[in-house]
Amino acid sequence: MNMRKLVVEDNPSFEQEVYEFGENHPKLMITAGIHGDEVAGISIAYDMIEFLNNTKLKNGSIKIMPKCNPVATRVFNRTSFYDEVDMNRIFPGNETDGPTHKAAKNVWDEACDMDIIIDLHCANQYSIPYILSIYDKFPEVLSVINHLPLENLVQSSGLRGQFFVESNYQRNQNAFIIELPSGSSKGAIKTHLANNCFDALKNLLIALDFIDGKTVDNPPTYYGEILDIKSPVSGLFKPTKSSGDVVNKGDIIGKIGNTVIKADNDSKIHTIMPDSYVYKGDLIYSYIIKKEIQALDLGGKNDKTN
Ligand SMILES: [Zn+2]
C-alpha cells in the first residue's frame, strides 16, 4: 500500500489522503466525503483500505480517497467554511477559484487514468439505498454495476459538475454513485447498510478479478429518475407506507387531514416523510418506476448464459 497526502495551500492549508494498492489496469477508484456530512461512505472507504491492506490483489489497481473534502468532514458539513462551495457541482475543478475548486481538481487529476470510479454519498435519512448512474447515455457502466448485489439502480438526470457525471462525459470512464441513507444526526451511520455496501463492493472486486473469492450474482433492478410528490394541502402528513415499499397505482400512501394521498403509478417508494406537519408544496414522498431495459445489459448477467 502506498499513501500520499495532497496539500491544498490556504490559511489554514489542508490535506487529502490518497491510498494506492497496485499499479496496473484495470484501475478502480473509490472516493468518499466529497460532501463532508456523508459519513457512511467515508467509513466504508476506510474499511476497504483496511481490507485491502490484508488482501492480495490478483490484477489491476485500486485507489481510494476516503475524505475528498476533509475540512467539511471535520465538522460534518456538506461544504467547508472556506467558501461553502458544493464540491460535487464544480468538477473538474481548477487552481484559481479557491480551496474547494483546488481540492476538486486534485480528485479529478487523481482520477485521470481510472477505468472505474465509484463515488460514495449519502441521501436523506428517509431514503432507500441506491446506485445512481447515467445508464441511459452510458450503458457500458452496467457491465460494472451488474456485479453489485444492491437492490436499486436509479437513473441520474446527469446534472453537470458532478464528479461521476464529468468522468462519464469528459473521459468516458465507468463512473457512478452509491447513495446510502444518512443517519439521524451528524456523524451517525446506519451500520447494517454500510456493511451491505462494503460486501457489495467486495463482490464487485471478486467478479472483476481484482481479488480472489466467491461471487453472488444478484444485479440491481433498473429504475427511472426519482419523481417527487408535493403536498396538495397543508396539515399533518401521516404515511401508511415506508421507503422501499412497492405500491400499485391507487394504493393509499398516507393522509393529510381528510385528504387521501394515493399512488399515481405502479412504483417503489424511494423516500417518504415520517409523521410530520407539511405545507402545501412541500415534498411528502418520492418514487421510482421500474425500467424494462435489461437488454442494455452488456455484462454481468449475460456472462452466465450458455
Ligand atoms: Zn453527496
Image: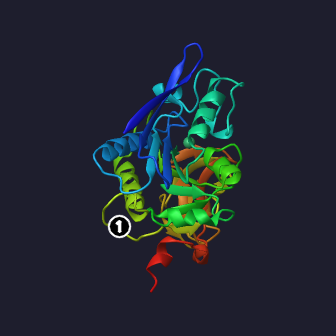
Quarter the C terminus occupies: bottom left
- Tell me which image quadrant ligand 1 sits in: top right
| Residue at the front extreme, as displayed | 24
Vertical position of residue 44 compared to residue 185: above or below: below
Determine the image quadrant of residue 232: bottom right
Residue identifier under label 1: 215
Looking at the image, which residue sits at the far top? 11
Residue extending farthest to the bottom is 306
Q: How is the image coloured?
A: rainbow
Q: Is any atom of residue 126 visible in this view?
A: no
Q: Is the residue at mark 1 in contact range of ligand 1, meaning its CB lies under 8 Å from it?
A: no
Between 287 and 195, which is closer to the camera in this rendering? 195
Say how many tags the image has: 1
Q: Residue at x 56, y 70 (%)?
A: 251
Residue occupying image coordinates x 68% and y 27% = 95
The residue under the point 35% across, 52% down is: 57
Question: Where is 285 relative to 143, above or below?
Answer: above
Check the image and report above or below for 59 versus 185: below
Asked if residue 190 lies left or right of residue 14, the reply is left
Few, some or many C-alpha atoms within 10 Å of disc 1 (few <14, some 14-19, many ≥20)?
some
Viewport quadrant of the N terminus: top left
Percent of width and height locating residue 23: 45, 46
- In percent of width and height, residue 123 lies at 53, 46
Q: Indicate the secondary structure of the residue bearing disc 1.
A: loop
Using the rendered image of the protein, determine whether residue 172 is visible from the camera's viewpoint. Answer: yes
Which residue is at the front of the view, 63 or 127? Answer: 63
Name the residue rendered at 63%, 39% in the picture: 88
Q: Tell me where residue 65 appears, x and y as whole percent.
A: 48, 38
Q: Amino acid at mark 1?
A: Thr
